[in-house]
Structures are given as C-alpha cells and as structure tokens.
Amino acid sequence: MEAIVAEKLVKRFETKIRKGLFRSEKKVVEALRGVSFTIRRGEIFGLLGPNGAGKTTTIKILSTLLLPDSGDAYVNGYHVVREARKVREQLGVMLYIEKGLYRRLTGRENLEYYAALQHIPPSDAKRRVERLLELVEMTEHADKLVDEYSLGMKARISFARALITDAPILFLDEPTLGLDPASARKIRDVIRELSRREGKTILLTTHNMWEADALADRIAIIDQGRILTIGSPMELKAAVSKGDVLQIEVMGAYNGVIKKIGSIGGVRYVKLDSEEPAAQRAVVRVGLDGSARDHLPTIVDVLARGGARVRNISVLAPSLEDVFIELTSRRGR
Amino acid sequence: MPLRGVVKYELRVIMRYRWDFLVLGAMPYLLAGFFYLVGMGIGGENALKNFVVATGYGEAFLYMLVGSAVLLVILVGLDSVIGELYRALATGWLELLMLTRTDVYIYMFGLTVPYFVANVGITILSFLPAAVYLSGLFAGLRLVVALLILFVGIIPLQGVSLIVATLVIRYKEPEALTQPVRAFLVVLSGSIYPIYILPSWMQLVARVLPPYYVSEAMRVSLMLSNPHLTLYYLGMLLLLTFFYYPAGLGFFKRFETIAKKSGELSKV
Ligand SMILES: Nc1ncnc2c1ncn2[C@@H]1O[C@H](COP(=O)(O)OP(=O)(O)OP(=O)(O)O)[C@@H](O)[C@H]1O
Ligand SMILES: [Mg+2]
C-alpha cells in the first residue's frame, strides 16, 4: 500500500486586495489546481517549487490543517477529511523552523510539553526527549530558554518535536530554510538516517534544487499549484540531458540579446541567472538540444552582433535547475 | 495526563514572569483603597452609614476588596484567554496543537487552570491579612468558602472569555472588541457598584452573566454568612457553567471549521 496518495487536490483562497484605506476587492488565489501524486512506503519524497507554488498548502491539507475544496488524499490509507484523527496519528509534522516554540521554556521543556500533549507518559517522554536531543545534537543546549537559541538551534528543536511520537510518516516543510550550512547538513543527515535506518516515509518541501537532488528518492516539481513532473532526480535530469547547458558571462548590452539567443534554432531556453546592471554584467544560462560544439559559434556570433562581449563560457551537466527552467518555460512564462 | 502537562508547563511559563503576579496580588488593595477613598470623599461624614443602608454590608473596605478581586479575575481571565488564543494563532502554535492527540478544549481548559490557580493564590495572599484583621480568625474559614466560590465562578467566566476570544480572532481587531466587552463586563459584574443602580434591562443582563454571582456569593459568604443565599448564588453559577462553557467550546469549534476552510488558522 502507498503511504500517501493525493488525488486532484484543489484549494483556493479568498484574499482581499486593498485599495487605499477603505476600498478592497476580493481576489481568488488558486493555490492548488489539481495536485496528484503518490508516495511509497519508506521513500523520501521531495516537493520542489518556488515561493507560492503550493508546497505548504499541500502539506497542510495532508496533515488535516486545511480542508481541500475538492479532491481526495489518503495517509496510510486514511482519508484526510473523513478520518482526520487517524491521519494525525500517522504523522510527525514540522511546519515551521522557529515558530510555535515557547520562548519562556527550555528546549527540553518544549519537547516534554509536546510529548505530554501527545499523550506520552512523562517517564517515557523523558527518555525519548533525551534520545532526540542527542540525535539532533542539542543535549548541550537543552536547558537554555528557547529565547536564547539561534535559528539553527530552534530548527533542531522543531525537528525533534516532529519526531516525538516516532510516527511512521514525516512531513517537513522547508526544514533547512535559512539555516547555516552546518545546521542544514545536520538536519539532512538525520533525515537520511531516519529513512535508511527506521524506514520512515518522508515528505519534504524545498525550493532548493540541490537539496532535493541530494536527499530525495523521488521529486515532484510543483509550480503555480500544478505538478509539472514526477520522477527520481536521475530520471528528471535524463529527460533534459539531450543537450548541453551553457553558462555564459556577458558584458554590455545583454538585454535585447537574450531574446535573440532564444530564437536561435536548437536553443531550448535562455534564462538570466544573475545580473549586475551597474557593471553591465550578466550570467545567462542556455539549454541546448544538441552539443555545445554545434551551437556555440552561432551563439557567440549573435552576442557579438548585439554588442555584448563574452567574458566566459562554461558547459554544465544538466541539474534539477535546468529541469525546472525547461518545464516552466515550456508553459510559456 | 495531557491536562496535567498543560497545567505544569503553562504554570512554569507564568512563573517565569513572577513580577507580574506580585503586582497583580497588590492590585486588589490598590483598587479597593481607591474606591473606598473616592466613596468617602463623595459621601463625606455619612459615607459609611449610607453604605450600610444601601448595600446591607457593614465593612465597606472588605466589600471593595472582594469587588476588586473579582474585577481582576474577570479582566485577567478575559485577557489571558484572548491573549493566549491570539498568540497561539500568531505563532503557529494553534496548528501544532491541532496536530496532537490532545483536544484543543482540554488545552484551553488546562490553560486557564494555572492562571486561576495563580489568581486564587494571589487572592488568598491579599485577602488573608485583611480578613483576619477585619473579622477575626473565624474569617479564615469563610475565606476558604469564598475562594471556592471564586474557583467555581472561573469556569463559566472562561466560557464567556472563550466566546469573546473566538470573536476577536475571527474579526481580527482585538482592541475594538475587547475594550467595550471589558467595560461592559465590569459594569455588569456588580463588583464595585451594586447592580441595582443600573437600568433594569442592564440588571437583567447582569443576572445572566457569571460575574455578578461570583461577587455576590463571595460577599455573602465572607461577610453575611447566609448559607442559603450562598447556595443560591452557587447554584446559579453552576447553571451558567452548563450554558457558557459548552457555548464557548461551540464557538471555538465553529471557528476551527471555518478556519480550516479559509486558511485563517495560519495567519492573523
Ligand atoms: N492562508 C492563506 N490565505 C490566503 N492565501 C494563501 C494562504 N496560504 C497560502 N496562500 C496562497 O496560496 C499560494 C500557495 O501558497 P503556499 O504557502 O502553499 O506556497 P509555498 O509553495 O509553500 O511557498 P513558499 O516557498 O513561499 O513557502 C500562494 O499564492 C499564497 O499566497
Ligand atoms: Mg511554504
């Protein structure tokens, strides 16, 4: 049986667009427009997408905190609306990194309090909390007030809190957002360990392509409330690796030139990676159909005629980022 | 068990703000002293005589002290429920709570216990010297009864507070709603001024709200020792409990369902 099944989930939010002091207009935001996927037992499943894609909305529906407008979802076979209580019993959820902690309690007290709310007897809770503190390497700071914690420490406590019931399924919403590399790595290590050693099913969201690539067994790319593709990182990359990816650093008039490159035959997409308008410098990413050798001369020629100077060109292996750019540009954005 | 956890840790949080509570303990005295002096100032020589005629109670200061304590319990109760619910919503705690096996109502109830344990503790501390000084040691016993009444009165008060709190988080403008409600509750509580000075429709409203019975029952038990009257007030409180507590929970339940549809749970 699948651990999680989502079928055509739709969610709209009504928001008010403020226009001055008194006037406001209702606007409907389509957060999810028919999201479907399944997650297998024991799998790390990454939901990858930019800000506002609908990742958190998906997690909240699956954890019974939001009701879908239509569609169904099952967690370990339980329906998220009709059997909400059962669903919650299957889950450990990390929704925020630093929110929802008691600032006036210590890290340990926060965990013990949550354990009590989860109906874990105090003596078991003590032992479990101790083990979790070790797991996230917070034993040393466990008895300080959360008020005095750094973001990374709060994240570790929030993460440990999601593990308190030893639930078979974990939902982690951007578990490493804003953390320094060391804290982020620690959390990723634990996620891997939980999956490998304890066979937990893990759904994690991220907008970090690299993280999804490094952690997830399978990835769903979501954008504007739609799933664009699902597959293992390898499969997704293979789908775009028919051609090379070029990274070109240009100086001078690059604005008009980007459009021109896009219209060259054999170019799948062009995207501005970064720019420094003051220095008239930009890095452009170009996805190709074939090899760099075939297309490079034309591209350089177009750039030169457009008045841009090429500073540097590198040929890259396709990454998830290219998968993402390709998928979103195909839909004409 | 979860209830014990809530009480234990919430109490711990409160205890980390000790000074607030010490100040609260002194408040009934300050308030009572203030009202007493105002009364004396306005009433002049006959102030105390008039007081006895008007209220039927001999000890004006003790009367004021009871009233002030009830007043504080109303206000602290209302503010703590609204404050906690608002904080829970704003910090994402409410969502995390809803993910646990504990019923949100159990949590809500548990939340109020420490506040009121602390409150009653304060009231004991502030009353004991006054009661002993004014009415002798026997008052100590009556005091226990009075505090019990306060405690019984807390539960329907919580229900009322929860109704107000739910409206507040639903309509997102806390002050606009709480200030009038607060003033209204205070006036209708009869804690400082007896309610018979109010227009008759307001007296009627006062009689279906818990605060009035709390102040009256405490005064009667503390100063008149009229068991029948005390029991009558207690009975009314119990009756109101059966109405207001479920009503409060019902309001909250409704909010929960709406919020899960609209996405209001995660934003303020
Ligand atoms: N409670 C809400 N009320 C109104 N609109 C909402 C609410 N929650 C989300 N939205 C809207 O729904 C869309 C999807 O939001 P969601 O939070 O699911 O995105 P996300 O993928 O988690 O993004 P992020 O990376 O920024 O966390 C956004 O346009 C957002 O503005
Ligand atoms: Mg999000």
Image (cartoon, helix red, strand yellow):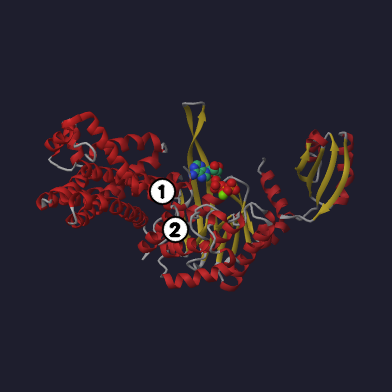
Instruction: Answer above or below: position of B162 versus A141.
Output: above
Of mark 2 and mark 1, the one earlier in the sequence is 1
Q: Is residue A77 visible?
A: no
The image shows residue B38 at horizontal and vertical percentages of 26, 33
Q: Nearer the viewer, residue A129 or B233?
A: B233
Q: Nearer the viewer, residue B97 or B213?
A: B213
Instruction: Answer above or below: position of A41 versus B52.
Output: below
Q: Nearer the viewer, residue B49 or B94?
A: B49
Which residue does the numbered mark 2 point to in the structure image?
A: B99
For mark 2, give the secondary structure: loop
- Would residue A214 be found to the left or right of residue A151 on screen? right
Instruction: Please report contact status of discs 2 and 1: CB closer than 8 Å, yes or no.
Output: no
For the residue marked with disc 2, what is the amino acid? Leu
Q: Is residue B95 visible?
A: yes
Letter of the chain that mark 1 sits on in the rendering: B
Q: Residue at x 40, y 38 (%)?
A: B174
Q: Residue at x 51, y 30 (%)?
A: A18
CA distance for labels 2 and 1: 32 Å
Marks 2 and 1: which is nearer the front? 1
The image shows residue B109 at horizontal and vertical percentages of 33, 55
Instruction: Answer above or below: position of B210 versus A260.
Output: below
Q: Are marks 2 and 1 on the same chain?
A: yes
Which residue does the numbered mark 1 point to in the structure image?
A: B20
- Would residue A187 be found to the left or right of residue B193 on screen? right
Q: Residue at x 52, y 40 (%)?
A: A29
For mark 1, give the secondary structure: helix
For the residue marked with disc 1, what is the amino acid? Asp
Q: Nearer the viewer, residue A307 or A22?
A: A22
Q: Residues within 10 Å of mark 1 (few under 14, many from 20)?
A: few
Q: Residues within 10 Å of mark 2 (few under 14, many from 20)?
A: many
